[in-house]
Image (spheres, helix red, strand yellow):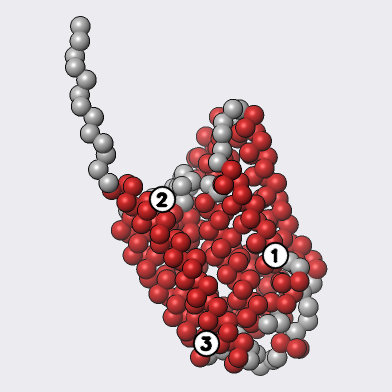
Amino acid sequence: MHHTHTEMAGLPVWSQILLALPFLILALLYIWGLMVSSGKGRSWPVWRTCFWILGCVLAFTAVAGPLADQAHHDFYVHMMTHLLLGMLAPLLMVLAAPIMLLLRALPVTAARKVSGILKWRVFHVLTDPFVASLMNMGALWVLYTTPLYSGMHESPALHVLVHAHVFIAGYVFTASMISKDPMPNRPSYFYRSVALVLALASHGILSKYLYANPPAGVPAAEAEAGGMLMFYGGDIVDGVIVFLLLRQWYHAARPKPYKSPQPVTG
């Protein structure tokens, strides 16, 4: 059934709180980890803290408040919040290396338990770049080419689930490519690059598809504007991920400085 945006009800407050609260908690937990780590005399880059807080703020803004409410009625604004929640916030938060900070802050025994959990098979599979790409890009195709998009606007519970998935899938995808955190699965740079290229191609094709094929209930002008924002805005974030992946590859592959053997004495 087709519907217009003017027929949609506003976002329930409870759904906004449910989506926004985790980002407030994550910001506070990061600050706690920073304070504990500093108490142990361990320094932590200021820029990582800034990236984490900014990422939480952007994600918070995308799921609660005026922008989130407007996104419920306007596809262009919806796409703006998609870029914030599913791409830019995950990129900033991955660069903040939260797992590394957590391991520094926790007691040794607890840190070893966390390291053990990260080695579970399920995390090994989920952080595979191709699996992460499928979770991220595949879900977007399902969202925008099936009745799921219109259903999300009619069911607050579905709205919460979709937005939670958009962030989690975006974070896992970005982490599988460039994370500096301890990872259960660290494939080769070539493997990651192939997955990244295919994912970027899928994102670009989807944005062009939306430009010409609006989701049910979305006016053509909004779909065109949203598709263009998805294409060009996504390119900017994707360009940063490509740059960082190639930079890490370069540093890993460049020849190490030669160290002459020390003379044997005695």
Circle 3: element type: helix
Tell me the kind of residue under disc 1.
Answer: Thr
Circle 2: element type: loop
Residue count near mark 2 (Cα–Cα under 10 Å), binned few <14, some 14–19, many ≥20:
some
Q: Residue 67 occupies which quadrant of the picture? A: bottom right
Front residue of 155/174: it is 174
Residue carrying label 1: 61
Q: Please report the residue visible at 37 percent of the width from the left and 68 percent of the height from the top.
A: 197
Tell me the kind of residue under disc 2.
Answer: Asn
Marks 1 and 2: in contact by CB < 8 Å? no
Residue 166 position in % (x across, y down): 58, 67
Residue 151 position in % (x across, y down): 66, 81
Q: Please report the residue visible at 78 percent of the width from the left and 81 percent of the height from the top.
A: 9
Residue count near mark 3 (Cα–Cα under 10 Å), binned few <14, some 14–19, many ≥20:
many
Residue 122 can be seen in this image: no
Circle 1: element type: helix
Q: Please report the residue visible at 40 percent of the width from the left and 74 percent of the height from the top.
A: 201
The tag on residue 211 is 3
In what quadrant of the picture does the N terminus appear?
Answer: bottom right
Residue carrying label 2: 185
Determine the CA span between mark 3 and mark 1.
25 Å
151 sits left or right of 141 in the view:
right
Whichever of callouts 3 and 2 sits on the residue coming sooner in the sequence is 2
33 sits left or right of 203 in the view:
right
Residue extending furthest toward the right = 13
Q: Residue 243 occupies which quadrant of the picture? A: bottom left
| Residue 218 in the image: above or below residue 62 | below
Residue 258 position in % (x across, y down): 22, 34
Residue count near mark 1 (Cα–Cα under 10 Å), binned few <14, some 14–19, many ≥20:
some
